[in-house]
Structures are given as C-alpha cells and as structure tokens.
Image (cartoon, grey):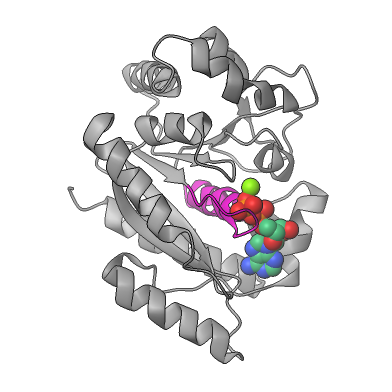
Amino acid sequence: VSTFDRPVNTRVFVVANQKGGVGKTTTTVNVAAALAQKGLRVLVVDLDPQGNASTALNIPHSEGTPGVYEAIVEGTDLHELVQPCPDIEGLTVLPASIDLAGAEIELVSLVARESRLDRALQSYLRAREQAGDRIDYVLIDCPPSLGLLTVNAMVAGREVLIPIQCEYYALEGLGQLVRNIDLIRSHLNPKLEITTILLTMFDGRTRLSAGVAQEVRSHFGDIVISTPIPRSVRISEAPSYQQSVITYDSTSSGALSYLEAAREIAVAGTKAR
Ligand code: ADP
Ligand code: MG
C-alpha cells in the first residue's frame, strides 16, 4: 500500500467559500479521508452548525453532543471532544451540533472572540506533538458565511483551500472572500495564505465547466489543483451512508480524483514553506 509523505510541520487548512453548495464539506471530508487512508494523521474540525462533515464521517452529533461549540465558547480541552472516525484509521473529528448555531452571536461578547478556536487548537496540537503523536493535517470546514466562525477558522489556520464550483457565477463573491482574507492577514493572522484552489463539480462535456476552469486558472495560476473533481453521483450519495466516497466506492472516478487532489496537496506539503 502506498503512503503519502508527512509534511514538515502540521498543516492547518481552512476550507472556505461564503457561497453554500460549492463543495466545501465534500472536499473537507474526502481530502481528509484520502490523506488518512494514505497513512497520515488528520483532524477534521466541523465548524458548520449543520454538522454535515460530522454526518459524512459517521460521527454522532445530535443536539447536546459536546464538540466545537464547547471548545470555542466554553474553552473545553479538545482531548475531551475529538472523536475517531470509525471507518478510517488516523482520521479524527471535532464534531459540530446544532448548538453551534448560537455561537456566532454568543462569541460577540466574549474576550478574544476571533482567536478562540486558534487557542484551543494550538494547545491540542502542541500536546499531541509532545506526546509523540503529531497530527499532520487539520481541515476546518467553514459555514457558508464570512461571520465570526469563519474568522475563527482563518485565525486558527495557515492555508486557505477554496473549492470553486464549475458553474455560472462561480467567481462571483470570490473578490469579497479574497478581501476578507487580506483583512485577516493584516489584522489578525499574518501567516494566512490562499495556497490551494480546487475545482469541483466539473463536467468535462460542457463548455461552461471548461470555461470556468480556464478562468480560474488564469486568475489563480499554479495554486489551482491540476485534477478537477468531476460531478459524480457516487460523491453525492456517499454522505447518506455516513461515508466518504473514498470508503463508499474506492474505485469510482470521484474517489480517484479526490485521492489525486489529496496527493497534490500532500506533495506541496513536503516542501518547506
Ligand atoms: P458546501 O459545504 O459548500 O455547502 P457541499 O459539499 O455540502 O457544499 O455540496 C453541496 C451539495 O453538492 C451536496 O449535496 C453534495 O453532496 C453535492 N456535491 C458536492 N460535490 C459534488 C460532486 N463532485 N458531484 C456531485 N455532487 C456533489
Ligand atoms: Mg458545508
């Protein structure tokens, strides 16, 4: 079985795009599953109150389940909250329940409201590293907004991964996302960088998909992953079986393309940044 090389340091990705339905959660879950399947230690932080990433990775997250809300609002240690994904070794999840929906408002009146996830995550990562059990990749699945939860992700992360759906209006709103990232970089997290763009729901038969792909590549250059993720029924039905497409149908085009995208991401991580 082939494996991916471990990165020089733990890489923390913020999977963000304030548009809903562009493939943030699908990308988080499947890139995480692919990296873990290739022997890496991966933590998914589900930062969307819908908890779709938790569902897709077979992690219970009914109302009242302790998770990311307790970490950022109450300061609970992540050791008490992180759950192993039962289907993939090396993959762990900080789940979200609907309780997180209140956090966006509750955070407003808390001290250090923008950096609460960062503090919780960094102390956990340090403890794991000191215990000789370093996490290689953290992927934070953001809600479809640029509110305080997404700001918390961008303060905690180092790299932004933007999934772009190969559809009409794909690039609309990206300017706003990029400006927000610039603001975070200048005020809250100088290390934040857009390092990865992934084209999702690509349909090779249509001129529309090809056109969007070309436009994204001419705008963002070589940070666009060379493998686009095809529109695939297997990818969309996997979550209803509480699975990533990597475990649900490992030889499907969807699984293979997410594995290839994960390989590109992992290769970039073995070079010192
Ligand atoms: P977001 O997290 O950005 O809101 P999702 O990852 O939940 O987006 O995707 C939105 C919908 O599109 C979901 O129903 C998902 O199953 C479906 N979907 C995502 N990627 C693909 C794909 N490559 N092919 C087919 N359906 C997809
Ligand atoms: Mg989502």
Question: Which residues lie in the magenta part?
Answer: 16-39
The correct choice, above or below, for 17 with respect to 153 in the image is: below
The total of numbered circles placed on residues is 0
Left or right: where 215 falls relative to 74: left
Residue at 51% across / 9% down in the picture? 75
Residue at 47% across / 85% down in the picture? 211
The correct choice, above or below, for 47 with respect to 4 in the image is: above
Q: Looking at the image, which is closer to me, 261 or 120? A: 120
Which quadrant of the figure has residue 154? top left
Residue at 71% across / 45% down in the picture? 56
Residue at 59% across / 15% down in the picture? 106
Left or right: where 87 falls relative to 34: right
The correct choice, above or below, for 218 with respect to 127 in the image is: below
Visible residue check, residue 192: no
Q: Position of residue 23 (x, y in %)?
A: 60, 58
Q: Position of residue 72 (x, y in %)?
A: 52, 17
Residue 231 on the magenta span: no
Residue 38 on the magenta span: yes
